[in-house]
Amino acid sequence: MPQGGAGLTLRSGLVGVALGTLFAAGNVYTGLKIGFIDGGAITAALLAYTYFAVLRPKRSYTSAENNVTQAIAAAAGVMGAVAGFAGPIPALEMLGYRFSGFVYAGWGLSLGALGIVIAVFLRRQLVEDEELPFPTGTATAEVIEAASAGGGQAIRRSIALMVAMLFAMVLTCLRDVAGVVPAAFFLPVEIAGVSLAALLVGVGASPLIAATGVLLGVRSGLSLVFGACIAWLVVAPELLRGGVVAEAGFVPLVNWLVWPGVALMVASALTGLGMQWRSLALALRDLLWRSDSAASRDDPGSEVALGPRLLAVLAAVGVLGILGIGWLVFDIHPGLLLVLIAASVVLTAVCARAVGETDVAPVGAVGAVGQIGFGTGGVLSSLAAGSVPAGAGSHAAQMLWTFRAGRLLRSDPRSLVLAQILGSVVGILVAVPTYAVVAGAYEIGTASMPAPGALTWKATAEAMSSGASALPDHAVMAMLVAAFVGVGSTWLARRPGHLRGLLPSPVAMGIGFVMPAYFTGAVLVGVLMIVLLRRACPAWSGRYVVAVAAGGIAGESLMGVALAGAIALGVWAG
């Protein structure tokens, strides 16, 4: 039986802060590199248990403490995404808007506070009453329970993670510092007179991207590859042959390809959101009619998650921070901001229910709603408005995953909320300078640091601000075709029938349009690896693949941040 209790001790807090520091830094790099991030809850639980089992064997590390540790680390890990460092902030800077780190920190903390408050109000309904699965939270609790019951396998998974992390760090050094390993292996083939090497078609030597392919799974990974094949093997050669784009290369081609890619993603996201109208109605019910104040006194997992005073302080930080920064910095009218906050509460509730049922938070979709619905004053207001529901939704999702793990482990919800707050502060303190270092060392929006999320946010903001005049030649027709495909495939994929689960994901396809083609080659390697491992050694892959993939991502991202720091300090020229 898992141990209950508060779990917020000095050692659980310190280990959580240490791991959260690493996750927050690594995820800023990962978000800019590939547009995907993972809070790292399971990774944190494995590493924390192994630390105390191996180095502190005489001091029993309880499941409640481990749950608090992973809550702090995962909350810190997602703060880069909450603040917008994977999308809206680099998009702003690509458009010429730059603000101080204090603005970014205040914005991120405000969105995080709003997300925590919404999650607290939704916990009773979604976690307690309906007992939605929240698969990541459930998996985290299972890992913690298994480690507490007998840690042999947990230690072995942790060792596999650390070996993979070390391998990824060494490979990154051999590639980026020593130059022994090339950045990619390009295909020596021509299509329509265009060299595929000039289009960067090949396989990247990147453990981070290959590991991402593993975690994406077969459908999403192959969908991304399919989108990239259309973009870089079909459309790009035609653009060059027809003179629509003057020269081969990632930047000139992606400036055209981003438009159909965005149309695919936005059309699919909005269609999926519209088809979830029942979730919207349930989200309104969750917010208006149920709260934690009715929690049962008989179940320790049903205690009130947070006292009313601290809850009021968090709400004030969130609302006043968004109002102040949104008005004074991002030039959004206070009246519109109030409506945006109210809409973001509802959209975050939709995200929360989607996370509970599917484990996927549609933050891209709700961010697009914010951009389109409230970004009427230009690219600055569009990007800022979209980041409100996206940031709050990201943090609420992480909080609810933690609540689900706490429910299964019978942890004290108050400790988990305090852990989330501590992790948020640690995460933003690390993410802000890390973003400055990485953005200063690498040119954002290029093949070395493509920032696919930022490219899509930027394109949506430009379309909202300038309309068709912002689009290059023939892009309007491409967007219409892509939007039709996005709407149709999303609708068909959600209808009962044989096509359900077989059609490619339009969102993943859209990412394939804006990533360098050799990144996609590495994703394909990861997908093929998971398919082969599941067939050849299913038991081993079930136990260790996720840990190895997490190590690959952590190793390259942390080494990437370290190398960016070396460039910033003038120790290494890059």
Image (spheres, helix red, strand yellow):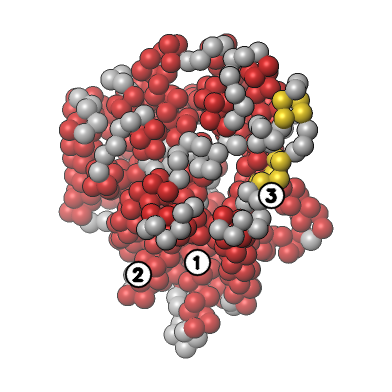
In the image, 523 versus 360, the foreground residue is 523
Residue topped by disc 1: 45
Q: Secondary structure at mark 3?
A: helix
**Residue 506 at x, y percent in the picture:** 60, 29
Amino acid type, residue under disc 1 in the picture: Ala
In the image, 493 versus 200, the foreground residue is 200
Amino acid type, residue under disc 3 in the picture: Gly
Side (left or right) of 365 relative to 184: left
Residue topped by disc 2: 13
In the image, 150 versus 564, the foreground residue is 564
Looking at the image, residue 544 lies above or below residue 95: below
**Residue 502 at x, y percent in the picture:** 72, 32
Looking at the image, residue 132 lies above or below residue 445: below
Q: Mark 3 or mark 2: which comes first in sequence?
A: 2
Assess whether mark 2 and mark 3 are in contact (beta carbons under 8 angstroms). no
**Residue 526's mark?**
3
For label 1, the crowd category at 10 Å Cα-Cα, with few meaning under 14, some 14 to 19 and many 20 or more, is many
Q: Quadrant of residue 194?
A: top right
